[in-house]
Image (spheres, rainbow, N blue to C red):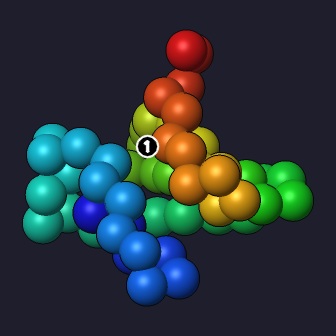
Amino acid sequence: MLCYKRKKINLSLVFAGQAVGIKLVEDRIWLTSFMDYDPGCFDDENYVYAIAGH
């Protein structure tokens, strides 16, 4: 779960209890990272999480 501006965004149960990194890659677009993988991006304007490749 990712907490952003007092809102909780559920990425996946797979990441429960794990450290997930986020990095700003474009204006209002955040890349999520887990170990050596970048599973997707989070749009902080629309509160939408997009899975990579979809």
Q: Nearer the viewer, residue 10 or 20?
A: 10
Q: Nearer the viewer, residue 54 or 38?
A: 54
Residue 23, image x, y percentages:
65, 63
Element marked by disc 1: loop
Residue at the limit of the structure toward the bottom, as seen here: 6
Q: Is residue 52 above or below residue 34?
A: above
Mark 1 surroundings: few (<14), some (14-19) or many (≥20) residues within 10 A: few
Residue at the limit of the structure toward the top, as seen here: 54
Residue 8, image x, y percentages:
34, 69
Q: Is residue 27 visible?
A: yes
Residue 25, image x, y percentages:
78, 54
Q: What residue is pinned by disc 1? A: 36
Q: Quadrant of the N terminus?
A: bottom left
- Residue at screen point 65% across, 52% down: 46
Residue 48, image x, y percentages:
55, 45
- Residue at screen point 77% across, 60% down: 28
Three-letter residue code for mark 1: Asp
Q: How many marks?
A: 1
Q: Is residue 31 visible?
A: no
Q: Quadrant of the C terminus?
A: top right
> In the displayed structure, does residue 43 sit left or right of residue 6?
right
- Residue at screen point 46% across, 64% down: 21
Q: Nearer the viewer, residue 28 or 52?
A: 28
> In the displayed structure, does residue 7 sit left or right of residue 26?
left
> In the displayed structure, does residue 1 sit left or right of residue 34?
left
Q: Is residue 8 above or below residue 52?
A: below
> In the displayed structure, does residue 11 sit left or right of residue 4?
left
- Residue at screen point 50% across, 42% down: 49
